Image: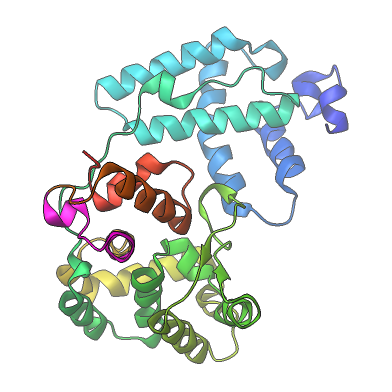
Amino acid sequence: MNKHNLSNGRNFGYGKQMNYAAKQALNDRYGEAGKYATKASHLTRFKQFSSWCKENGIRDVRYIGKEEVKEFCTELAISVTSKEKSVSYAQNQISSVNVVLSAIRGDNKLAVSPALAVGERTHIREATPLSLDRDNYAKALTCLNTAEAKVALSLARELGLRLREVGLFRPREAMNQYLKHGVIDIQRGVKGGRTAARLIKPTQRQLQVISNTQQVLAGKNSLVDGAGSFTKWRSEFYREYYQSGAYAHIGKFHDNRAAFACEIYKQITGKDAPVVAGQRLVDKGIDKNAREISTQILGHHRIDVVASYIGSSR
C-alpha cells in the first residue's frame, strides 16, 4: 500500500482534485514510466465517473461508497438498455472506476462486477472475416504503397496482433526470443496493460513476416519509432489503409485477428471455425479446448470473447 492510502487528507492524500488524485494513484500503481496507454484509458473513463460525482455533490473519494458506485452503474445500465452505449464500453467504464478507486483507496471494497452491472458482452461473429481468403489478403497487400504498411498488415494477419501491438512490435526482440526459447511472447502494446504470458510458437510463415519486418525497419526498434509516436503512426497507417483500397478487399483492420483466430481453430480441431462452417463441427470438448488455446494466443482473459472471432460454440 502506498503512503497516500494511509492519509486522512482529501482524496486519501492524493490531492484536492479527484481527477488529479486518479492520475497520481495510477502512476503509483503502474509506475510513472510506461503503461501510458493503460493509464490514459483508465483516466479518460474515470473522468466521466468523477463528473457524475460532482453533479451529485461529491468532490472527494473519501465520501464515495458502494451505493454511489452502484447508482452510477445503474445509470450506465439504463444507457445500455436504451442503446446509447454498448455493453462493452459500459463494462470498460466500470472496470476503470474499479481500478482507479482501488488505486486511490488501497483496497477493493468498492469494486463492482461489470457483467452483473450492465450485462454480459454478447457479440458473436456471424460473418467470415474477408482476409481468411488469402487471395483477398494478397490483393490488400498489393494495394498498400509502403513497405511499412505491408508489414503492419502482415503482422496483424499472420500473428493476430491488434493495431497497437503491431505498432510497438519489436522484430529483433521477437527473433531473439525464438532463437533462445523456441517461442515469442507478445507483451508490448497489449490491451489493458496485461502481463500474462502470450506465447506463440512461430511457423515458418510467421518467422518470415518477423524477418521481413526487421529488414523494413532497418535498425529501428518498431514501426512507431519510425513515426515518432503511436498516434502519428496510427493516423498515417489508417490513411494509407483506407485510401489505398486495402479496406475494400478485407474490411476492418481488426478483422485480421478474426481471420488469424479462424486459422488457429482449424489447426487445432481440423475443422473450419463455426463462423466459416455455419455451425460447430466438433464436439463441445474439442471446441472448448480450441477456444481456450485461442484465448491465450490472442491475449484475452475470458474464453467467451473468442466468439467474436470464430463464432458461436452452440
Q: Which residue is drawn at 37% across and 69% down?
A: 156
Residue found farthest to the top:
67
Q: Which residue is drawn at 48% across and 11% down?
A: 71
Does 177 sit above or below residue 187? Answer: below
Question: Is 219 left, or right, of 292 in this rendering?
Answer: right
Residue found farthest to the left:
278
Question: Is 4 left, or right, of 278 in this rendering?
Answer: right
The residue lying toward the viewer, choosing from 279 and 56, is 279
The answer to whether one can see residue 57 in this image is no
Q: Which colour scheme is used?
A: rainbow
Q: Residue at x 68, y 57 (%)?
A: 34
Question: Is 298 left, or right, of 278 in this rendering?
Answer: right
Main structural element of the magenta stretch: helix, strand or loop? helix
The part of the chain drawn in magenta is 262-278
Q: In which quarter of the image is the N terminus?
A: top right
Residue 118 position by quadrant = top left
Residue 70 lies, in percent from the top left, at 50, 13
Q: For residue 87: magenta? A: no
The residue lying toward the viewer, choosing from 148 and 114, is 114
Does 197 sit above or below residue 173? Answer: above
Residue 249 lies, in percent from the top left, at 16, 71
Residue 142 lies, in percent from the top left, at 23, 85
The residue lying toward the viewer, choosing from 34 and 21, is 34
Q: For residue 269: magenta? A: yes
The answer to whether one can see residue 178 in this image is yes
Residue 214 lies, in percent from the top left, at 52, 87
Residue 243 position by quadrant = bottom left
Residue 135 position by quadrant = bottom left
Counting the numbered discs, the total is 0
Q: In which quarter of the image is the C terminus?
A: top left
Does 55 sit above or below residue 198? Answer: above
Q: Which residue is drawn at 42% across and 19% down?
A: 117
